[in-house]
Amino acid sequence: MNKNLQGWINLYKPIGISSFSAIYKIKKKFNIKKIGHAGTLDPNAEGILPIAINKATKLIPFINLNSKKYYFTIKWGEQTTTDDADGEKINYCSKIPTNENILNMIDHFVGNIGQVPPKASAIKINGKRAYTLLRDKKKFDLSEKKVFLKSIKFLGSQNNTSSFFIECGKGFYVRSLARDLAYKLHTFGHTTEIKRTEVGNFNCKTSILLDDLLKIGQSEFEFNFIYSSTSMLDDILAYEVEKESDLFDLSMGKKIFVNKEKLTKRPLSSDKKALVFLSNKGNIVSFGELIGDLFQPHKVLT
């Protein structure tokens, strides 16, 4: 692979493989030096997994993960150790909520809420992953985290299952929502299907299946399936650097002058700091803050 190539892959991850295993297959197939992903998907979940290549991996902490959309199904009456169908069943309840009960309850979860992650998660406790402790049958508790649910839509019920569509923010666990919604409805529940349909600008329509990606050749991959480094950064102010002298100053960590008229959009306030990324010929060169008319680099990627 061209070592200067950088950007994103809009991958559709299938069920039955971890996010790490998926990107390892791509790394090995296309001889990619650096690779990473934004927003982990569980092995039993499918859907959009944005993958960064080479220098684009440095952008992962900056991209917007506050707009993710999921379709999922809850099976009522059973609680599992993992809050999905893979876990051991530990609690049962004969009560199945009515559609009216569900509709009256779901809006209580919209907004900023507290959420305890599933015990089968990658969160570290004293240096060990929670899913490892669960597998080893160790006793432990996870702390509540603040998360954001923008919207939830009830799609209907069939037998003892119900389906939903949500839009949520970073760090949100669909399995925890299923568990907590069931609790509020005085029963138990776990997810039987989770499908992520959108992350930022990436959606299912423009994605490529993992198996299909692994079948194509190197040239087709580089020319047709790598999006620009800026494709996941539409929510951040952008500025194109044209002068070689500015590029040199940035490489030295120095401030440069920015013509605000050439920003992709105007800052909300002229007297406050704003996060900006600078690009040159489609490649990200720096992240930093715009203070007045001066750009202060915090991370230089050149």
Image (cartoon, rainbow, N blue to C red):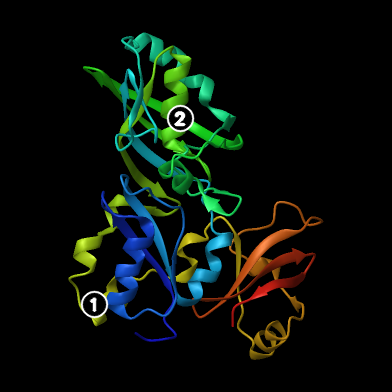
Residue type (three-letter) at the residue carrying disc 1? Glu
- Residue 266 at x, y percent in the picture: 66, 58
Where residue 86 sits, quadrant-wise, is top left
Give the position of the N terminus as an image quadrant: bottom left
Residue type (three-letter) at the residue carrying disc 2? Leu
Q: In front here: 31 or 88?
A: 88
The residue sitting at 25% across, 18% down in the picture is 160
- Residue 140 at x, y percent in the picture: 55, 37
Q: In this view, does 262 lie to the left or right of 198?
A: right
Quickly name the residue at label 2: 177
Q: Is residue 207 left or right of residue 39?
A: left
Can you tell which mark lies on residue 220?
Answer: 1
- Give the answer, above or below, for where 187 lies relative to 206: above
Circle 1 or circle 2, nearest the eye: 2
Q: In front here: 161 or 257?
A: 161
Determine the CA span between mark 1 and mark 2: 40 Å
Q: Earlier in the sequence, mark 1 or mark 2?
A: 2
- Residue 197 at x, y percent in the picture: 34, 45
